[in-house]
Amino acid sequence: MSKKLPILFFFISFNFWAQTEESFNLGFESNAQYYVDDQVTGDFTASDRFRSNSYLKAEYLVQNFTFGIQVEGYAPQALLNYSPQYNDPINIGLYYAQFKNDKLDITLGHFYEQFGNGLALRSWEDRQLGINNAIRGIKLKYKPTENISLTGLFGNQRVGFKVSEGELFGLDTQMDMPQMFKSENTSGSIGFSYVGRYQENESDNPDFKKLTSVFSGRFQMNIHNFSTGLEGVVKMDDAYVENGTLYPDKLFKGNALQFNLGYSQKGLGINATLRRLENMNFYSEREAAGNTYNELIVNYIPALTKQHDYSLANMYVYQSQPSLSFNPLEKAGEIGGQIDVFFNLKKDTPLGGKYGTKVSANFASWYALKADFISEYQRVDVGFLEAGEHYFSDMSLEVRKKLSPKVSGILTFLHGNYNKKYVEETYGFVKSNVAIAETTIQTSEKTSLRIEAQHLWTRDDKKNWAASTIELNANSNFSFFVTDLYNYGNEDTSHRDHYYLLGGSYSKDRTRIALSYGRQRGGILCVGGVCREVPPASGLTLNITTSL
């Protein structure tokens, strides 16, 4: 062989890669806590006072290809109340290879996907909630025309560093229909989905199938300032699960219906969503139904209520109730909806003032599906649009106002009704009112001070609460805060507790480091309408995020 051939090959290869568009992305996130004994939250009796969740993600892009890997560490253990499935100090959580051009998109390895509104399928990651239900397998997207998109997938869902026993199959088609409309301000689309879960089973019931199928159809239309959408889902026979016990001789169908209607113009927006769910919990392993860690969930059913930004407004927060239950309470699903209204009061008017005013209002109300339950799990007869037990309602009004070039404020008021017995399966019904005032003062170009005051009134549960926050953004790099929740109205005077938190952060380019110390009130933590339980705890918290 000529000695010039390797040199020539190297030159050709170097020239090829030199002309190739490529990039490398690296991201790191670490959340660590050191737990301490506290007279309010109690002594820390578990092992390992120091715990951390860390994520290192690397992604390499070259031409039409993307290669990625995510390494995760839970050392010496995961943070409190995260799934025990995250039991390795360090391991590979995700890996994938993707090819994508204008018509074709193929992914091998781990991937995320959503069909329609997610009522049939959604896989996603939320580290704050401890959710990562990525699918490991193959996903194929194909666009034969500009207006048609086809998706097919197969794989197993992630659970910890392993994957589910059950296998998932998915097919989805999305068709835009601009040719049906002559107006440029009118558009529409239709879509159809199929999701199947295949899991081996042992049962004497011949009607108990290994495959459970979900079918979905949806329609979306926009006409000038109006928009509307409808999605319907049918889940075929699925075995009933209660407290982790599978009943293969008790088979029930499920269904979902969601309707959206909206109107928008300059300075005004109205959006309404109505939804009915009946036995629509869907997991890649049947026995996982109802687990407290949100693991192995195939579909996405968030609570359709206003997502509040304030601690006391999230004291009694709704969680969707899609499942069928005979014990401890009889529940078949939920029915209800919400409406949002946004409008602007113009500048230089009596109500708008010099700078104008932004107003938003929300009303949400949810009920149980009215149903007749037949003893011994034999049957449940559910009304279509009949409401039963009142689960939750929330009315809120928010006013945002700029008072001067350097001062702005927000006023919020909300009234809520919360059925603890049925939502949390504990006891009680809570009626509450919350008032919140917030102001931000821009003291200089890079310095601002934010002050927040909250109050919650209720004659129920633990009675009245007060809360306040002071946050100083000293410059573009440093910020500091102190906050306190005080249960001053508790009838048990020995538990009129303060839940304080103080800390700060440093940000530079793509790096942020935050440090805080204080108490965490136990209860429900919700992000985007999906919730998990968090325990009461006290200690030091360190958060680091950076990327290249």
Image (cartoon, rainbow, N blue to C red):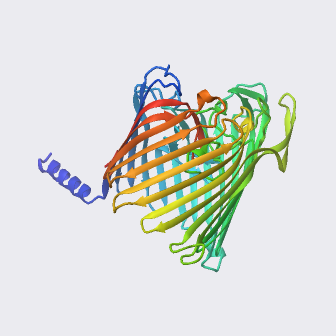
Asked whether residue 67 appears in the rendered view, the answer is yes
Q: Quadrant of residue 48?
A: top left
- Identified at 63% across, 45% down, the residue is 456
Above or below, 65 against 95 in this view is below
Asked whether residue 116 appears in the rendered view, the answer is no
Q: Is residue 244 left or right of residue 309?
A: right
Above or below, 38 against 316 in this view is above
- Identified at 46% across, 29% down, the residue is 78
Q: Quadrant of residue 494?
A: top right
Nearest the eye: 149 or 516: 516
- Identified at 68% across, 27% down, the residue is 244
Q: Position of residue 168 (x, y in %)?
A: 60, 41
Q: Position of residue 175 (x, y in %)?
A: 62, 64
Q: Is residue 19 left or right of residue 223?
A: left
Q: Quadrant of residue 57?
A: top left
Q: Position of residue 428 (x, y in %)?
A: 74, 35
Above or below, 346 against 34 in this view is below
Total marks placed: 0
- Identified at 49% across, 20% down, the residue is 46
Nearest the eye: 45 or 291: 45
Q: Position of residue 76 (x, y in %)?
A: 41, 25
Quadrant showing the N terminus: top left
